[in-house]
Amino acid sequence: MNNKINYVVLVVDDSPESLGMLNVALNKQGYIALVALNGAQALSIAEKIEPDVVLLDAVMPEMDGFETCRRLKLRHPNTPIIFMTGLTDVEDVVKGFEAGGIDYVTKPISPDEVIARINTHINTARLALSAQDALDHAGSNVFCVTDQGRLSWATPKAHQLIDSFSGDDMSPWATLADLFKVWLATGGQQNLKVNCFVTSFEIMYERKQNDKHMLKVVEAKIEKTPLELQQNLPITKRESEVLYWASHGKSNWEISQILSMSHRTANKHLEQIYKKLGVDNRTSAAAISIRILES
């Protein structure tokens, strides 16, 4: 269960009974369920947080599932969408796939079947993204050196970072070679702290690649603040502060103490946050916040 706790499933259905049933089933399996009663609400939620998978009712008033699917895929092309439908005609099934759906389940819904489909498609999507990451490796900050610490190759980003850190040093890789040689001889278990340039930074050992060593420039992580939430979500400055601490696991009482407000005021702010984000509980609101803070 723990390995799925961060996965977000957006469930879109105009039937409150179906939403309630799926919400319970998904929560029991460790998923974070976000629910929408129509296509417009689903699109609104998807603007705030990217779901890992979408369960989408095909037949809904105003904006049907097919149109909702097309619009969702424009924003999140890599998110798998599973149609839930009572339609079994080949024409309707094909229409769902043409809209961007990857699978479908027929109503009445079997929670066990839905969970199995979700597991499969999330795993497939993760593997596809991993493959894409490998293809995009040139965009990462890695490089390879010999046992003597001499540079074999480096991605453009690694070159850019080292040049920005080294200041006026005209041959930074040569300067680093001796440091790498000594560090590699120790096994590279701990990050190498580089303090010989204008800017200090760290090098992390990635893996052995043939007869060379793949290393990575560690970029300093910038700690995000409540302002990031305020800029990305339709909430006030005070609400962003409350949501920030809620997403860090603080209780309402702890939030009230940190922000010097009453316990009741903290509760009221959270109620407003739920309404504005289109969610109905603390876990869903925190999930939206965490994705923004960790992106």
Image (cartoon, rainbow, N blue to C red):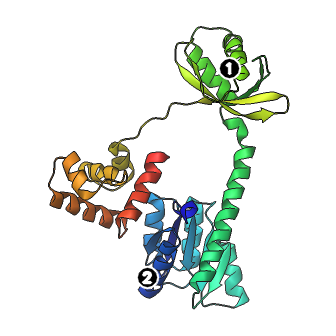
Q: Is residue 115 left or right of residue 130?
A: left
What's the mark number on residue 183? 1
> Quick one: SS at disc 2?
helix
Q: Residue at x 43, y 57 (%)?
A: 288
Q: Residue at x 41, y 64 (%)?
A: 284
Q: Is residue 201 above or below residue 241?
A: above
Quadrant of residue 222 within the rendered picture? top left
**Image location of residue 166, percent across then percent down:** 59, 14
How many circles with numbers are drawn on the protein? 2
Other-residue count near label 2 (Cα within 10 Å), few / some / many at <14 / 14–19 / ≥20 = few
**Image location of residue 217, percent across then percent down:** 62, 28
Q: Nearer the viewer, residue 146 or 46?
A: 146
Q: Is residue 75 left or right of residue 233?
A: right
The residue lying furthest to the right in this view is 210
> Disc 1 and disc 2: Cα gap in Å?
56 Å
Q: Residue at x 59, y 90 (%)?
A: 107
Amino acid type of the residue tagged 1 in the rendering? Trp
Q: Is residue 282 above or below residue 256?
A: below
Which residue position holds label 2? 20
Mark nearer the N terminus (1 vs 2): 2
What's the mark number on residue 197? none
Q: Is residue 92 above or below residue 182?
A: below
**Image location of residue 34, percent across then percent down:** 45, 69
Judged by depth in the image, the label closer to the viewer, 1 or 2, is 1
Amino acid type of the residue tagged 2 in the rendering? Gly
**Image location of residue 224, percent across then percent down:** 40, 40
Q: Nearer the viewer, residue 123 or 227?
A: 123
Quadrant of residue 80 within the rendered picture? bottom right
Q: Residue at x 61, y 71 (%)?
A: 81
